[in-house]
Image (cartoon, coloured by chain):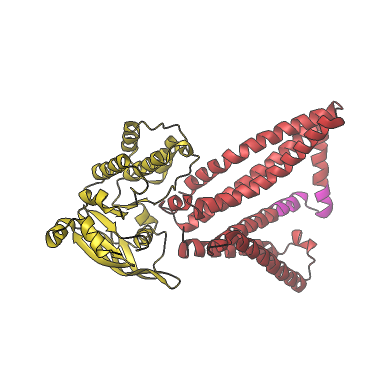
């Protein structure tokens, strides 16, 4: 059932995001060609440069926006009547939404890499692109002796933080649902309060363990790496409790 | 006869408001039952509790002996009182979705009904008229071989011709071993198909009786008796 839920969520998101991604790739190509052939002045270039930047930022904003609205529309609005009539547990619904968010974050990341690649290939050469990535890896090498391990650790931490953030947004949306009026405002207020509380807690932990906030990305301490997992579980339990025990679709 | 749905002391409070107040019900298989009451009497709340869209404040509801869960959801075919399907989907995708999630979904039965109504399988739901959307929803609901059909206001807001279609669809598609619970306040339209009637008033069951016995004992139609009980 989990796979089926993910499939339908993916399809629902796809219809919004794939036109944005197509526009992003086309604009990247046009922008890169204009730079390559020195059409990098004048009104037309300004327009395409603006559209390119807008598409780049827009795709990130759209990805986050549709991930959040997919959760609220699919579970807390009219579609919720169908979702909760399916022979699926509440926990499976939440897990499907989290996995869907992770999948789209990866797709977004891949699209941004693709744009970078297109720009590199059109403006320069494949060799230059390869050397750029090599330099990026070397930069990581300066921080960590074991480059691969360091990169992997950063990726894992970023992923875990991303999952925790998604779970927090879902929890905030669920908390907002408890209130008949001003649901969005309450969700945002909850989000801000939790972020502040979490920052304060992290500072205390850093103080106790003798790490700086920056070191958070590079410490070997597994407890610190497990923090986003603990937060994600806490947020998800809250979301589950509200959806399973306090759900009241209007 | 097997009891499809049983409520024992079922209560649901919204804050201090009692939506359902100690409801005891025993619904047997093979019956079409009208859940009748004015607006705000607790009909939708009772159906939502049976569908596990709400959790009781007190008491319990059991479906085929089980507390509401994913297991009972597989046995219950629920038609909410609103447009609940993703409106960007076309009818064919909705059939795929129901087939994916409900093992008791009968695609050929749904296709027969959609074709009989000349509903375009490739038309997105959002482009369909209100009446057609409601028909699609009912067709999907009634195309399952469920143990319990929970139909919340299935004929509200549709024209008389559509009402006839909806009632015909309900009668001709439910399995003999299943129970159909129809919530409505349009009694006159559904009276002819009902085996039993439940009157809900301010969250309490004030009557649960076989409709023939009700007519014999009161000398009135269910609709007439309803108007008497719920007179303002």
Q: Is residue B102 left or right of residue A148?
A: left
The image position of residue B7, as x and y in percent, is 29, 65
The image position of residue A140, as x and y in percent, is 80, 50
Residue B195 visible? The answer is yes
For the image, the number of numbered tags is: 0
The answer to whether A65 is drawn above or below residue B66 in the figure is above
Tell me, by letter, which chain the rendering colours yellow. B
Q: In this view, does A27 lie to the left or right of A10?
A: right
The answer to whether A100 is drawn above or below residue A33 in the figure is below
The answer to whether B211 is drawn above or below residue A4 in the figure is below
Which of these two is toward me, A163 or B123?
A: B123
Give the magenta-colored segment's residue range.
A139-155
The magenta stretch spans residue A154: yes
Which of these two is toward me, A148 or B186?
A: B186
Q: Residue at x 82, y 28 (%)?
A: A34
The image position of residue B19, as x and y in percent, is 38, 67
Name of the residue lying farthest toward the top: A37
Residue A125 visible? The answer is no
Q: Colour of chain A?
A: red
Q: Which residue is drawn at 53% across and 54% down?
A: A95
Q: Is residue A227 left or right of residue B60?
A: right
Q: Which residue is drawn at 30% across and 49% down?
A: B146
The magenta stretch spans residue A65: no
Image quadrant occupied by the N terminus of chain B:
bottom left
Image quadrant occupied by the C terminus of chain B:
bottom left
The image position of residue B47, as x and y in percent, is 35, 58
Query: Dominant secondary structure of the magenta stretch?
Result: helix
């Amino acid at each position: 059932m989990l796979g089926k839920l993910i499939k339908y969520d993916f399809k629902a998101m796809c219809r919004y995001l794939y036109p944005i991604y197509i526009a992003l790739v086309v604009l990247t190509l046009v922008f890169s060609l204009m730079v390559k052939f020195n059409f990098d002045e004048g009104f037309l270039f300004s327009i395409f440069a603006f559209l390119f930047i807008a598409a780049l930022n827009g795709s990130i904003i759209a990805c986050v926006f549709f991930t959040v609205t997919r959760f609220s529309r699919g579970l807390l609005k009219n579609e919720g009547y169908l979702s909760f009539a399916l022979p699926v547990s509440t926990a499976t619904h939440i897990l499907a939404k989290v996995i869907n968010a992770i999948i789209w974050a990866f797709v977004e990341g891949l699209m941004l890499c693709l744009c970078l690649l297109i720009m590199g290939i059109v403006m320069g050469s494949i060799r230059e692109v390869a050397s750029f990535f090599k330099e990026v890896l070397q930069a990581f090498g300066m921080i960590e002796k074991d480059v691969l391990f360091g990169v992997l650790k950063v990726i894992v931490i970023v992923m875990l933080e991303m999952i925790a953030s998604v779970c927090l947004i879902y929890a905030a949306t669920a908390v907002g649902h408890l209130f008949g009026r001003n649901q969005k405002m309450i969700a945002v207020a909850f989000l801000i309060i939790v972020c502040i509380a979490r920052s304060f807690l992290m500072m205390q932990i850093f103080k106790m363990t003798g790490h700086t906030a920056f070191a958070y990305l590079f410490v070997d301490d597994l407890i610190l790496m497990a923090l986003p997992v603990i937060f994600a579980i806490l947020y998800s339990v809250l979301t589950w409790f509200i959806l399973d025990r306090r759900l009241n679709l209007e | 006869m097997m009891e499809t749905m049983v409520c024992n002391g079922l209560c649901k409070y919204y804050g201090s408001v009692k939506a359902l107040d100690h409801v005891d019900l025993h619904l047997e298989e093979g019956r079409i039952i009208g859940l009748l009451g004015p607006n705000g009497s607790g009909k939708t709340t009772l159906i939502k509790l049976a569908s596990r869209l709400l959790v009781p404040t007190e008491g319990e509801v059991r479906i085929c002996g089980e507390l509401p869960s994913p297991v009972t959801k597989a046995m219950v075919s629920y038609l909410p009182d609103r447009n609940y399907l993703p409106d960007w989907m076309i009818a064919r995708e909705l059939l795929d979705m129901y087939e994916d999630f409900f093992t008791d979904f009968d695609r050929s039965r749904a296709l027969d009904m959609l074709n009989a109504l000349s509903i375009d399988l490739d038309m997105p739901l959002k482009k369909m008229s209100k009446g057609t959307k409601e028909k699609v929803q009912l067709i999907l609901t009634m195309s399952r071989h469920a143990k319990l059909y929970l139909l919340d206001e299935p004929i509200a807001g549709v024209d008389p011709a559509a009402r006839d279609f909806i009632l015909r669809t309900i009668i001709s598609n439910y399995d003999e071993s299943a129970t159909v619970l129809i919530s409505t306040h349009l009694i006159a339209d559904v009276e002819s198909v009902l085996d039993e009637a439940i009157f809900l008033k301010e969250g309490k069951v004030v009557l649960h009786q076989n409709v023939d016995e009700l007519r014999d004992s009161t000398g009135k139609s269910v609709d007439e008796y309803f108007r008497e009980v719920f007179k303002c």
